[in-house]
Image (cartoon, grey):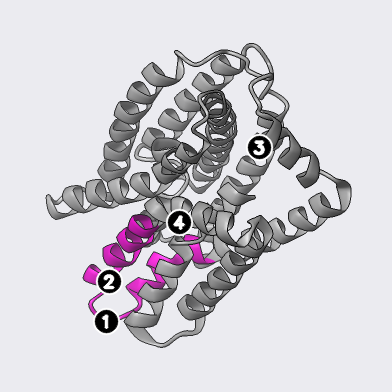
Amino acid sequence: MAAAVGIGRFAYTPLLPPMQETLSWSVSQAGDIASANFLGYMIGALVASTLTQRVERQRWLFAGMLLSVVTTAAAGLVVSFPAWVGIRFFSGIASAFCLVLSTVMVIEFLARCSRPQLSALHFSGVGVGIVASVLVIELLRLSGFSVFVQWVGLGITSVALMASSWLTMRVLPSQEGAGQSNTSKALTDKATTPPVLKKLIVAYGFFGFGYVVTATFIVAMARRLDHATLVEPLTWIIFGLIAAPSVLAWQRLALRLGLFPALRLAYGVEAVGVLLAGCGPGHVALVTGGALLGGTFMGITALG
């Protein structure tokens, strides 16, 4: 999750401003590249969902891991706009494969062990990856290396993360469909009744529409403020630091309030964060909006 999502999907955000300066991208071009990534993610998620109960799902997970590493590192080697569109498209596919397949495998395993609450550690990997990406980027930037070398550095970091995670994931069962507890089955049956599922999908669509634009451009927005060299990494590292433990907090709140009340609250907090980041004046509004965004987007994903 740290490598494929925290770095593979979201490292584009902190590196977007220097990429725009280096390659003379317009805001529209930057948005097109981000959209290619989202399109790849959507396609990847739909395909991966058909593989979750297949015996060979470990192989598909490994393929997603490998593709994520390759597309992250390759970003440091290309300059043409069409190549960037292609790289980010396939990076989106890789992110979705890793998220969907690893999440199913981990949650099934935790259900068998009667430790479902530990899924928060799995989802916290996204925040950890975001923080790691900021540290790698800033270390290389302060050392005088170009944005292309920073991408390669992130690729090397992804290799280390993927290798260690594969050593763990490969010991999990290849296919595990019968490990659900009675409670898990009851929750699944209730959650997948058509009216509820339709509402959840619509709400999740609005959630995605609301957060991805801000999450893509928030560091570029910080660059337009005074003291940008400090505000840029600070905004994104706070985003990641709050994202890491947020899933556990939302899980506990859902146990107290109920799943759907907790989701409604998370949607509300996220909306405030997006409005603050987009419309609020100055540094405090941007950083606070980013913090609220970071503190909810993975919680909503996990609860959804």
- How many residues crowd around disc 1 within 10 Å: few (fewer than 14), some, or many (20 or more)? few
Q: CA distance from mark 1 to mark 3?
A: 39 Å
Q: In the rendering, which numbered label is found on residue 77?
A: none
Kind of residue sitting beneath label 1: Asp
Q: Earlier in the sequence, mark 3 or mark 2?
A: 3
Residue 178 vertical placement versus 211 (above, below): above
| Residue 270 figure quarter | bottom right
Q: Earlier in the sequence, mark 1 or mark 3?
A: 3
Q: Quadrant of the N terminus?
A: top left
Q: Secondary structure at mark 2?
A: helix
Q: CA distance from mark 3 to mark 2?
A: 33 Å
Magenta stretch: helix, strand or loop mostly: helix
Q: Nearer the viewer, mark 2 or mark 1?
A: 2
Give whichever of 168, 252 is nearer the camera: 252
Q: In the rendering, which numbered label is found on residue 249?
A: 4
Kind of residue sitting beneath label 3: Ala
Give whichever of 259, 298 is nearer the camera: 259
Q: CA distance from mark 4 to mark 1?
A: 33 Å
Q: CA distance from mark 4 to mark 2?
A: 26 Å
Q: Residue at x 28, y 52 (%)?
A: 134
- How many residues crowd around disc 4 within 10 Å: few (fewer than 14), some, or many (20 or more)? few
Q: Which residue is mark 3?
A: 45
CB atoms of marks 2 and 1 within 8 Å: yes
Q: Nearer the viewer, mark 3 or mark 4?
A: 4
Whether residue 166 can be seen here: yes
The span shown in magenta is 214-242
Q: Which residue is mark 1?
A: 226
Q: Residue at x 49, y 16 (%)?
A: 172
Q: Secondary structure at mark 1?
A: loop
Q: Which residue is mark 2?
A: 231
Whether residue 79 can be seen here: no
